[in-house]
Image (cartoon, grey):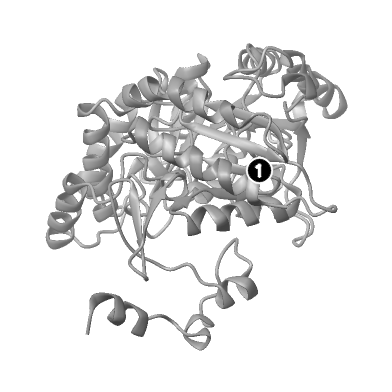
């Protein structure tokens, strides 16, 4: 029997797919029209039929350095043979401290203490708890409210959902935590901007309005992505993040950057904070921390925040921050993170992104003028094409474009009314050309 015949014989039937309730997926459609990946290497996924698909989203914004990195595979293999699990409650594994010090070295100066989580969603909720607890430790327990941003995404746990600004992620679940939202920065006058838009810095002043409404004595923190990903690659206008930082400082409000997508190279810098020249009080990380190999997240805080907990912790054996996860600093995840960060540094991944970004920008803006395309946004190796709605169904055309691209050997993401792109850092110009040729044809072919 040929390999192709064997592959077809192994194709799943509807019944075999039913048990898995898939996340962020139309389960009814998928299980009648499945897309199954069986392996990945470099910039490519391999399907169960044996077809190769260029990974134009780097997994899910997480495998920027490509799939199957031998350095990470080797580290994970050795790690699981050496220490498959060790608790982080009252006991520490040796790799956890190495990872924490490496993260401290890579993140902007002033972010010095690392708390490990399992994912970006966990990191967001940890950051929110840390912020509220910090103010209570400072004797300012009324500072409980959070300010997020429209079209922001901070994971799917209750805290992150509440400060997130994507309506579809919130409407089924009822009341979350106390949160208000800044307006997003997608202005009509900024359509088809290349990189940071020129207009919209004044939107940061909306924070002053919310301070006037709630009073700073009731606001714990502002949480934003330096550049949003899942909300449609929303780029901050020039000076916008600097202004948010200044307003937070003025009113004694913490600033949290969710760098789950922007961390570890996607912007052409190590972090979005570096790209935009603004340092937060707290930063959340995940995805690129292990290059997507093993789930792991982190919250990195300022010394002021950490020392406040230490100074108010009571007896030295008491737990200062009663929070954590069974798998915080899992030793195998730590092995993956150390290897991933080593590759990130030694192979100058952020510089690879910086070098390829101008070409990516040139190619994505070639789509301007195609039918259905109403906006294009890009920064670093991240981009989104906003698609005109079909009969009041904003997700229909992006979904059809995603399926057409897949069938033609390209993986792109449909998110809301956008098609989103985040190619691997190791992509070639030829692969970028092919990505946009397929995407262009798929847009044109969509009704």
Which percent across, then down, holds residue 275? 47, 18
Residue most extreme to the right = 213
Identify which residue, 29 or 314, lies in the foreground.
29
Q: Is residue 435 depicted above or below 187 in this figure?
A: below
Which percent across, then down, holds residue 365? 58, 26
Answer with left or right where residue 250 lies relative to residue 420.
Answer: right
The structure residue drawn at horizontal position 71% and vertical position 39%, both measured from the top left corner, is 371
Answer with left or right where residue 141 lies relative to residue 403.
Answer: right
Identify which residue, 310 or 406, lies in the foreground.
406
Answer with left or right where residue 70 lies relative to residue 113.
Answer: left
Quadrant of the frame with the N terminus: bottom left
Of helix, strand and loop, which one carries label 1?
A: strand
The structure residue drawn at horizontal position 69% and vertical position 15%, both measured from the top left corner, is 247
Which percent across, then down, holds residue 367? 60, 32
The structure residue drawn at horizontal position 56% and vertical position 76%, both measured from the top left corner, is 31
Q: Is residue 50 depicted above or below 181 in this figure?
A: below
Answer with left or right where residue 385 lies relative to residue 98.
Answer: right
Reading the image, the residue beneath label 1 is 418
Identify which residue, 396 or 167, lies in the foreground.
396
């Amino acid at each position: 029997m040929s390999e192709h015949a064997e592959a077809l014989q192994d194709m799943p039937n509807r019944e075999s797919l039913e048990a898995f309730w898939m996340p962020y997926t139309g389960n009814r459609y998928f299980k009648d029209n499945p897309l199954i990946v069986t392996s990945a290497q470099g910039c490519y996924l391999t399907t169960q039929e044996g077809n190769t698909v260029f990974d134009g989203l780097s997994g899910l914004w997480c495998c920027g350095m490509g799939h199957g990195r031998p350095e990470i595979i080797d580290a994970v293999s050795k790690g699981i043979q050496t220490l498959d699990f060790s608790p982080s409650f009252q006991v520490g594994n040796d790799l956890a401290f190495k990872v924490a010090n490496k993260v401290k070295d890579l993140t902007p100066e002033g972010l010095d203490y690392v708390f490990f989580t399992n994912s970006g969603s966990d990191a967001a909720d940890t950051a929110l708890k840390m912020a509220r607890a910090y103010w209570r430790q400072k004797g300012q327990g009324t500072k409980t409210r959070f300010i997020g941003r429209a079209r922001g995404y901070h994971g799917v746990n209750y805290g992150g959902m509440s400060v997130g600004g994507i309506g579809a992620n919130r409407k089924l679940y009822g009341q979350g935590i106390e949160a208000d939202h800044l307006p997003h920065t997608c202005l009509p006058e900024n359509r088809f901007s290349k990189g940071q838009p020129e207009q919209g810095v004044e939107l940061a002043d909306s924070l002053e309005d919310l301070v006037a409404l709630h009073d700073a004595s009731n606001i714990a923190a502002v949480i934003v992505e330096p550049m949003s990903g899942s909300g449609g690659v929303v780029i901050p206008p020039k000076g916008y993040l600097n202004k948010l930082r200044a307003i937070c400082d003025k009113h004694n409000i913490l600033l949290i950057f969710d760098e789950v997508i922007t961390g570890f190279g996607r912007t052409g810098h190590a972090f979005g904070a570096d790209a935009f020249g603004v340092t937060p009080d707290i930063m959340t990380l995940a995805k690129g921390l292990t290059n997507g190999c093993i789930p792991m997240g982190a919250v990195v805080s300022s010394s002021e925040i950490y020392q406040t907990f230490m100074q108010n912790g009571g007896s030295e054996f008491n737990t200062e921050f009663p929070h954590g996860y069974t798998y915080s600093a899992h030793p195998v995840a730590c092995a993956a993170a150390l290897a991933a960060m080593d590759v990130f540094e030694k192979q100058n991944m952020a510089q690879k992104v910086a070098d390829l970004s101008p070409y990516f920008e040139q190619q994505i803006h070639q789509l301007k003028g195609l039918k259905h395309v109403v906006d294009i946004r890009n920064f670093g190796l991240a981009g989104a094409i906003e698609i005109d709605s079909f009969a009041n169904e904003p997700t229909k055309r992006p979904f059809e474009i995603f399926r057409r691209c897949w069938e033609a050997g390209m993986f792109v993401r449909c998110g809301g009314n956008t098609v989103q792109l985040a190619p691997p850092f190791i992509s070639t110009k030829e692969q970028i050309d092919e990505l946009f040729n397929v995407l262009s044809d798929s847009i044109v072919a969509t009704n």
